[in-house]
Structure formats: structure tokens, C-alpha cells
Amino acid sequence: MESLNVIGSFLAKKRHELGLSQEFMAARLQREGVDVSRQMLANMESGRTQITDKHLIGFQKVFRTCLIRLFPLEIQILDEQFAQRANDQPKGSPRRRQ
């Protein structure tokens, strides 16, 4: 079965590194205003559930990290390359949407 998100395994790893249970992590997310249960978190971590923008913001707050750091290294590298291309464009030239 194909994973429905790209950050689930990172979330599980980071949660384990911090010594947090899924139940405790779900409670922290709820405290940040993200409606998520322990079961929903388990499904996100295993890739069985898609992750919304609201979930991402909650994970960012709970882990106290930049949003891009929630994503796999390959995506972080692509993001940096995209930002570099945008910075390399001459001032005043129109930017093309990718």
C-alpha cells in the first residue's frame, strides 16, 4: 500500500526521540488546537492518513521546528534549490509560477 503522506515516519521517529507516547503527543496537538486522536496520529505515522495543513502547523509548534524540517531530506533539498533559483532572478523580473 502506498503511503498517503511523506512525513509520517519522521513524526514517529521524532516522537520516539523525545520519549513521547502517541497518547501524549495527541494531547499536545490538541492543546495547540489540532483535533487529533491517538488513533489518528498512529494512522498518520504509518502513512494510512493524509496530513492537513492544520496538522503540519500543530506538529511545527509541538516539535518547535521550521516547517520544512518536518519533511524528508530530499524535499528539504528541493525546497532550498527552489529558494535559490528565486533569489537568483534579477530584481524586477516577473517570477514564473512552478
Image (cartoon, rainbow, N blue to C red):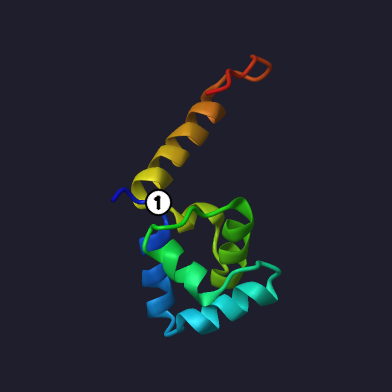
Residue density around tag 1, few if under 14, some if 14–19, many if 20 or more, within 10 Å:
some
* Residue 2 position within the rendered picture, expressed as x and y whole percent measured from the top left: 31, 48
User: Which residue occupies 38% across, 78% down?
Assistant: 17
The quarter holding residue 26 reads: bottom right
Query: Number of labelled discs?
Result: 1
As drawn, is 38 to the left or to the right of 32? left
* Residue at the (40%, 44%) spot, across then down: 75
Q: Which residue is mark 1?
A: 6
- Outermost residue toward the top? 93
Judge whether 69 appears above or below 32 on screen. Answer: above
Judging depth in this view, the residue of 54 and 18 nearest the camera is: 54
What residue is drawn where x is 52% and y is 35%?
83
- Look at the picture and state if 24 lies above or below 68: below
Compared to residue 35, the image places residue 89 above or below, namely: above
In the rendered image, residue 58, in percent from the top left (x then y), is placed at: 62, 64
* Residue 7: x %, y % from top left: 42, 56
- The answer to which quarter of the image holds residue 16 is bottom left
In percent of width and height, residue 48 lies at: 40, 58
Q: Visible in this render: residue 9?
A: yes
**Which residue is drawn at the image coordinates 43% and 53% (left, top)?**
71
SS class, disc 1: loop
Q: Amino acid at mark 1?
A: Val
Q: Outermost residue toward the left?
A: 1
> Can residue 11 be seen by looking at this rendering?
no
In this view of the protein, which residue sits in the foreground, 70 or 31? Answer: 31
Position above or below: 51 against 11: above
